[in-house]
């Protein structure tokens, strides 16, 4: 069960990875400040593909290839407007405390960070406050069903910019 009541939700189906990337790019372009984003869904559902698009929308320079943080746990990229994109994949993380050991204990200090977290369960259990949750699922045709949920005002504002 989700720890917070979702304000609103929207569902989009993407048929190609390019469409998922474009959707991520649109979200990135709609960001106006710090944001926390949980990306949930099975292996290969398109979470990293989405974040690659987000990076472009946030103005991360093309010289930085956006790769999956599966082994590094966190990848960070400078973005436009003084923001930075922190892309986490907690699939291999044993406990929230391990985040401190790898030097990312400032996650709660989101002053300039757009934080996108794949496999966020440990942080959700720790009651980390996400503004948005995106759930990724396969449909019968192997397309991706991407649902957007907003928690709190920042998330709701984001969704109304994204889907006016
Ligand atoms: N509509 C689609 N959206 C996103 N990816 C798609 C789509 N159709 C096919 N793909 C392919 O599915 C794969 C998605 O991989 P991706 O690494 O983004 O998944 P992931 O959810 O991050 O997985 P993991 O949980 O292992 O990190 C890519 O190989 C991509 O090319
Ligand atoms: Mg991934």
Image: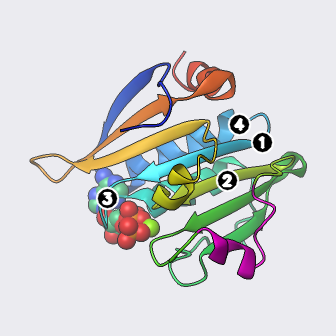
Outermost residue on the top side: it is 164
Which portion, as a residue range, is magenta?
A: 96-107
Mark 4 residue crowding within 10 angstroms, few (<14) / some (14–19) / many (20+):
some
- Residues under labels 4 and 1: Cα distance? 8 Å
Q: Is residue 100 magenta?
A: yes
Mark 3 packing: few (<14 Cα in 10 Å), some, or many (20+)? Answer: many
Q: How far separated are the C-alphas under marks 4 and 3?
A: 23 Å
- Residue occupying image coordinates x 60% and y 54%: 116
Q: Label 3 to label 2, Cα distance in Å?
A: 19 Å
The answer to which of marks 3 and 2 sits earlier in the sequence is: 3
Secondary structure of the residue carrying tag 4 is loop
Determine if residue 12 is in view.
Answer: yes
Q: Quadrant of residue 84?
A: bottom right
Residue located at (83% from left, 51% from top): 109
Residue 16 visible to the viewer: no
Q: Nearer the viewer, mark 4 or mark 1?
A: 1
Q: Which residue is mark 1?
A: 34
- Upstream in the sequence, badge 1 or badge 3? 1
Q: How is the image coloured?
A: rainbow
> Which numbered marker is on residue 115?
2
Residue 45 disc label? 3
Q: Looking at the image, tell me whether mark 4 or mark 3 is earlier in sequence order.
A: 4
The residue nearer to you, when weighing 121 against 155, is 121
Residue annotated with mark 4:
31
């Amino acid at each position: 069960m989700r720890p917070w009541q979702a304000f609103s939700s929207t569902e989009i189906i993407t048929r190609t990875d390019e469409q998922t990337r474009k959707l991520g790019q649109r979200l990135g372009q709609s960001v106006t400040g710090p944001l926390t984003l949980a990306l949930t869904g099975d292996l290969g559902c398109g979470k990293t593909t989405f974040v690659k698009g987000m990076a472009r929308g946030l103005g991360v320079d093309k010289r930085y290839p956006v790769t999956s943080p599966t082994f590094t746990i966190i990848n960070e990229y400078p973005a436009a407007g003084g923001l930075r994109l922190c892309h986490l994949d907690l699939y291999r993380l044993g406990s929230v405390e391990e985040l401190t050991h790898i030097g990312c204990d400032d996650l709660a200090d989101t002053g300039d960070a757009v934080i996108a977290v794949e496999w966020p369960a440990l942080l959700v259990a720790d009651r980390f406050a996400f503004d948005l949750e995106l759930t990724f699922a396969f449909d019968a045709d192997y397309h991706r069903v991407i649902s957007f949920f907003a928690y709190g005002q920042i998330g709701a504002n984001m969704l109304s910019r994204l889907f006016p």
